[in-house]
Amino acid sequence: MSKNNVLYLILIVILGLLLRLWNIDKPEGMWNDEYLTWSIANLKFPSDFFQGVANNCHAPLHYFYLKAWMFLFKDSDISLRVSSLVPGVISIFTMYLCAKEYLLKKHSELCALAAAFITAISGFLIYFSQEVRIYSLTFLIASMVLYYSLKVFNNPSNKNRWLLSLFSLLLIFEHTIGFVFVIFNTCALIAFMERKRKENSFANNIIAVIILCLPLVPFLYGLFAHPKYFSQWWAPFSWSKLLFYFTDLFSPVLKNISNAPPSFLQQIFDNASLNIGFIIFALVPTFICIGLLIKAFQNGRRVNLYLLTLFSATFLAVLIAALFGKIIFLTKYLIELYPILILLVAVGWASMQLRGFKITLATVFSVLTLFYIIVSYTSPVRLVREEGQRLVVSALCDMGIKKNDRVLYLYYPPSRFEKYTKESNLFFYANSIDKYNFPLYVYPGESSTYDAFKRGKALYRDVFLLKRNEKLSRFLADNYYLKMNKGDKLFIVELTSVSFFSEERLENIVLDAKSYERIPFLYLMSSYVKNYCLRESSQKLSYKGYYDSKSWRLHLFEKV
């Protein structure tokens, strides 16, 4: 590696670091998934911690990583976000190694620098390098799996095979569906390695990995057998998600982070006119990368068949699971495949013969990506976590909450806000009708959360039409109206992104079989609870208005 290339790599890493540091302190605080990750890692070790990890839907490794990080660096929001930044920056170098191992001979150094640069400016990776979630570390481990897979492909020595097994094991314990990628990777390697290299069998490694993964089997069974993790109850599948998957990975425009818009075409045609911004900043970089992917496969190398098979099998497996409602098709759930795509885009670009065209493509891709990241108010570094839970606490302070006032949360339990209420030194009476306990307060008879997740639409259809719900009214009276004194306030906190149906609209949906089948149960339930609580509270208390803060709306009532 020449001194110039060392300098280029250092500059690329510095660029990636600066982009990930920029605006890392999010004023809105952590949103629910981040908060849940922190709260599990924050549990008392070992008993509470192990129980929390076991009861969560994600694989355990990241919680151990975050627990160790918090022990060393505390748990301020910035510190927690840096725990994702560190693997994000390291990934720039590991992708450099992957491209070097691909062995493009005279193009290898150029290809390696290109892979590092794409990783450094990837809007998708920048976003998750600033989020307190598993995905930045998952990408790093996946890139190491790819690196040692390529090394095994070229030289199946004992060292390479055992290191591949180690990182495969880490991936399985880091990401819940990592085992899908590992299974297909092992099969594809065996299928496409040259026969003379298969003499060094994978059998011992495979057996060792299987034995080490056995403790994870009960966790995976419980996860996929329990209906509460069939996330299709809150976001139905749409084919547009497949298109948003590629624009998320190849452009700085992120649309499928938590739930994609319903239509890809509506992003292109905005109110019957072309959305020039989406076309330029999302479609153009994506088409460039797809063209380079096609170029990479033109050389017909055996390693390309291996990578294509691995990508296709994993992608289709997750797609089929999404079609059957077992998982939401989100870009981040297939993050294990991203190192492959980055590598092949770099390969396609480095192998181009027309130097002028190569420079033009690199310039257009780099300028569009960096311009959007730096300038756009919806860039990955500026995207607001609209469910950020500090927003609620700040709003309560702005609305003048006092010691004896009460709060009713309509989507998350009060524990989701404790980190920020302690920061603000707030003390108040809080309760919730949240997405975990709603059967206790809403369903007139006996109903468990298990039943609600499994067959909620059948159970709750008549409930949604009730104008008088004795069980819900009793909860409100016993916890709020009867315990409030004159002048006391009640704040009802709703998450508008899940409770957007009015009473009239909700009734029309329930009475229309097709609409009722199409709309996710979560939106119906959240809207019903919100409408009922607001109507009941308006009859018992004096309504003083509401306060909007991103995806939150806080309604204020006072006892007179």
Image: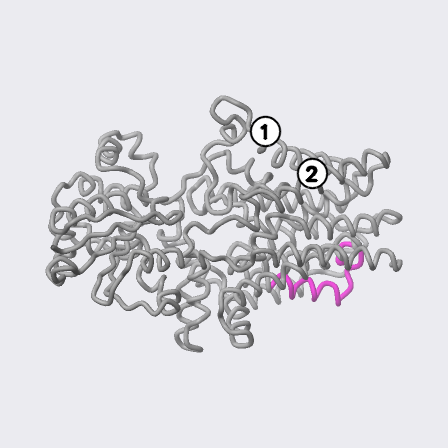
Q: Any mark on residue 289, and which?
A: 2
From the viewer's perspective, tell me whether residue 300 is left or right of residue 388: right
User: The magenta stretch spans which residues?
Assistant: 151-169
From the viewer's perspective, tell me whether residue 468 is left or right of residue 513: left
In this picture, is 397 found above or below 504? below
Nearer to me, 443 or 318: 443
Nearer to me, 560 or 197: 560
Type of amino acid at the residue the image marks with label 2: Cys
From the viewer's perspective, tell me whether residue 254 is left or right of residue 293: left
From the viewer's perspective, tell me whether residue 471 is left or right of residue 401: left
Q: Any mark on residue 276, and which?
A: 1
User: Residue visible at 41% across and 52% down?
Assistant: 387
- Return the x and y of residue 328 as percentages of the image width and height: 46, 45
Question: Dividing the image into 4 quarters, which one contains the N terminus?
Answer: bottom right
- Return the x and y of residue 76 as percentages of the image width and height: 49, 68
- Return the x and y of residue 545 as percentages of the image width and height: 24, 47
Type of amino acid at the residue the image marks with label 1: Ile
**Quarter of the view holding residue 275:** top right
Q: Residue furthest top?
A: 272
Q: Is residue 408 magenta?
A: no
Secondary structure of the residue carrying numbered label 2? helix
**Quarter of the view holding residue 296:** top right
Q: Is residue 166 magenta?
A: yes
Secondary structure of the residue carrying numbered label 1? helix
Q: Any mark on residue 338, and which?
A: none
- Return the x and y of residue 165 as percentages of the image width and height: 66, 63
Helix, strand or loop: magenta stretch:
helix
In this picture, is 356 found above or below 43? above
Label whose residue precedes the other's in the sequence (1 or 2)? 1
